[in-house]
Image (cartoon, rainbow, N blue to C red):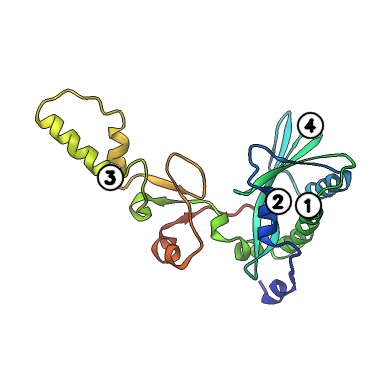
């Protein structure tokens, strides 16, 4: 992909603006009742095939919003659901929107959000998705990492002490119940994986820093970025 294309992209939205307005509303979406924005979202979803559908809803995974963060071009993924007549927009770790028809005046940033996404979609198609690979930062990607390389305090932080205790109980023929013994043994054997940037029982969150890049990056198995057709 030509660097000339990158130089022509000039996002109108700053990452910290969208982060502020979304306010990490994952469980309580920010409501937008505005027909102009609703029509922009409909225009956006009409340009690609949905990822899945059932009797009640359609899903699109993923769209990408171009932003400026610390002076650099990035893009962040977000998914869309159409349930009945309304749209629900979910931004990775930032929050969500509930969009329906109406005449209420929304924040200006949300007018720009879908206009910018539509423009960026053209570039995604033109570059066959390469622009996404170059611009989605790794704190907005998911993957997995073997526990041996994560070195974080977890539910298994005292796993080795737990095993020593089990050995002592066995040696002294003291009856006991160890409900998580198999999980702990898998952990110590290096067979336990942590999800990266995703919520699970064992999760690891990648921070875009030199320290994390040096210690962990090469050990992470990153998931493939999804591109809508």
Closer to the chain start, of discs 4 and 3, is: 4
On the rendered structure, is 216 left or right of 207?
left
Above/below status of 130 relative to 3: above
Q: Nearer the viewer, mark 2 or mark 1?
A: 2
Q: Dot 2, how many residues are within 10 Å of its Cα: few (below 14), some (14-19), or many (20+)?
A: some
Viewer can see residue 81: yes
x, y (%) of residue 139?
A: 54, 57
Q: Position of residue 116 (x, y in %)?
A: 77, 59
| Mark 1 or mark 4, earlier in chain | 4
Apparent side of residue 46 relative to residue 194 in the rendered image (left or right): right
Q: Which residue position is annotated with label 1? A: 110
Give me the C-alpha separation between circle 2 and circle 1.
9 Å
Q: Is residue 8 above or below residue 46?
A: below
Q: Earlier in the sequence, mark 2 or mark 4?
A: 2
Q: Position of residue 132 (x, y in %)?
A: 64, 61
Badge number at residue 84: 4
Query: In the visual, does 61 lie left or right of 46?
Result: left
Image position, residue 97 (x, y; %): 72, 43
Of badges 1 and 4, nearer the viewer stands 1
List the residue tagged with mark 2: 21
The residue that disc 3 covers is 188
Q: Please state which of the two labelled residues, at mark 2 or mark 4, is closer to the viewer.
A: 2
CB-based contact (under 8 Å), mark 2 and mark 1? yes
Labels 3 and 1: the sequence-earlier one: 1
- Residue occupying the point 31% across, 43% down: 187
Q: Residue 2, relative to residue 95: is it above or below?
A: below
């Amino acid at each position: 992909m030509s660097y000339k294309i990158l130089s022509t992209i000039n996002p109108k939205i700053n990452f910290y603006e969208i982060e502020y307005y979304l306010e990490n509303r994952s469980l309580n979406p920010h409501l937008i009742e505005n027909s102009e924005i609703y029509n922009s979202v409909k225009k956006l979803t009409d340009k690609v095939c949905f990822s899945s559908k059932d009797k009640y809803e359609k899903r699109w995974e993923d769209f990408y919003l171009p932003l400026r963060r610390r002076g650099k071009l990035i893009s962040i993924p977000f998914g869309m659901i159409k349930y009945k007549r309304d749209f629900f927009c979910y931004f990775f770790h930032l929050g969500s929107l509930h969009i329906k028809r109406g005449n209420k005046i929304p924040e200006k940033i949300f007018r720009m959000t879908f206009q910018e996404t539509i423009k960026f979609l053209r570039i995604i198609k033109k570059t066959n998705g390469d622009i996404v690979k170059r611009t989605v930062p790794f704190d907005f990607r998911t993957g997995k990492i073997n526990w041996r390389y994560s070195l974080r305090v977890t539910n298994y932080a005292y796993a080795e002490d737990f095993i020593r205790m089990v050995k002592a109980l066995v040696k002294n023929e003291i009856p006991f119940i160890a409900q998580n013994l198999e999980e702990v043994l898998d952990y110590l054997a290096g067979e336990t994986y942590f999800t990266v940037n995703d919520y699970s029982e064992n999760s690891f969150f990648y921070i875009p820093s030199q320290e994390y890049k040096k210690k962990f990056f090469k050990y992470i198995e990153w998931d493939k970025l999804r591109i809508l057709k």
